[in-house]
Image (tube, helix red, strand yellow):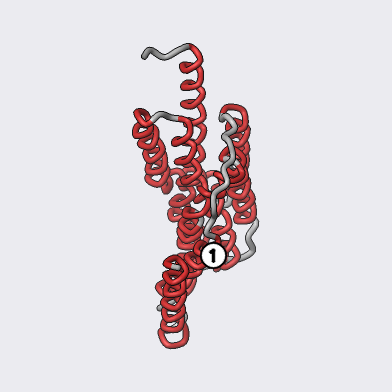
């Protein structure tokens, strides 16, 4: 059957909302890799010179973002179903902006790594929310194309990130890789609220226990794998690996039960 005028208007709105969503995915993916090009400048800013321990600590600036980005993905899609995708999308962007501001103001490498994880909580939530919006806004016939566009936006952000970070930091300083997220994020929030239709809320269960256990497992495992040079095997790595195995076993028992 040919599309009616109403169907055509709805589809145009869906594509506009998808474009805004892709901008959010692209922005958060940019920050995932942009910082990697700026690590030498960040180390010099906080440490004054390169050293093995400084490089090890600075590596957490990248790792913390990856961990935070990963651990929120399994649960935020369900949270968006409960409270509405448009609202949770904008809340996630707001968390991303707040984390960016705190990163720019961080007094040291450890604090910067912590705020990078907070920034990533907002960034990582965008992907499952975007997937849910595609499922609600597009027919099965068009979902594959819409998801392909979303994935392409994320991959493009990850690839362009290091170049983008270098271009922004060169004239202004590395802090501006975070400051620039404030106007960009606010613009995306305003466009999302204007263009995306409000989706009906659904009563669905959320596995908060599983999400917390998964977050603990990934954090412990990443800490163990990243601390072998500076913290020592027997004093840090082996205890952290053992703790991660225990948490993983508890996670499996909880999920099977």
Direction from residue 31 to residue 191 in the image, left or right: right
Q: Can residue 172 be seen at all in this image of the molecule?
A: no
- Report the residue that reaches farthest toward the bottom: 234
Q: Which residue: 42% across, 88% down?
A: 234
For disc 1, the marked residue is 209
| Residue 74: x %, y % from top left | 47, 54
Mark 1, secondary structure of its residue: helix
Is 134 placed left or right of 171 in the picture? left
Q: Quadrant of residue 94?
A: top right
Q: Position of residue 246 (x, y in %)?
A: 44, 78
Q: Please report the residue visible at 47 percent of the width from the left and 69 percent of the height from the top.
A: 254
Quarter that holds the C terminus: bottom left
Q: Tell me: residue 179, above or below residue 5.
A: below
Q: Quadrant of the N terminus?
A: top left
- Percent across and percent down for residue 213 are 50, 68
Instruction: Give the x, y percent position of residue 142.
Output: 37, 29
What is the quadrant of residue 191 in the picture?
Answer: top right
The answer to which of 155 and 145 lies nearer the viewer is 145
Q: Looking at the image, can residue 96 be seen?
A: yes
Label 1 Cα neighbours within 10 Å, binned few <14 / some 14-19 / many ≥20 = few
């Amino acid at each position: 059957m040919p599309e009616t005028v109403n169907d055509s208007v709805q589809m145009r709105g869906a594509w506009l909302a998808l474009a805004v969503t892709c901008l959010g995915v692209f922005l958060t993916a940019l920050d995932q890799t942009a910082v990697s090009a700026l690590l030498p400048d960040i180390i010099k800013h906080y440490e004054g010179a390169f050293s093995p321990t400084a490089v090890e600590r600075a590596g957490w600036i990248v790792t913390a973002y990856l961990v935070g980005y990963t651990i929120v993905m399994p649960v935020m899609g369900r949270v968006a179903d409960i409270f509405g995708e448009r609202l949770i999308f904008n809340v996630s962007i707001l968390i991303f902006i707040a984390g960016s501001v705190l990163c720019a103001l961080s007094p040291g490498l450890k604090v910067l790594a912590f705020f990078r994880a907070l920034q990533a909580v907002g960034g990582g939530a965008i992907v499952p929310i975007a997937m849910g919006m595609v499922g609600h806004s597009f027919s099965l016939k068009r979902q594959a194309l819409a998801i392909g566009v979303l994935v392409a936006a994320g991959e493009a952000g990850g690839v362009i990130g290091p170049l983008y970070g270098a271009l922004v930091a060169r004239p202004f300083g590395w802090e501006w890789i975070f400051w620039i997220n404030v106007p960009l994020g606010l613009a995306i929030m305003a466009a999302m609220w204007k263009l995306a239709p409000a989706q009906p809320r659904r009563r669905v269960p959320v596995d908060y226990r599983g999400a917390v256990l998964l977050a603990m497992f990934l954090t412990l495992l990443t800490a163990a794998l990243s601390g072998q040079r500076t913290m020592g095997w027997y004093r840090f790595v082996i205890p952290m690996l053992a703790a991660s195995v225990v948490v993983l076993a508890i996670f499996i028992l909880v999920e099977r039960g």
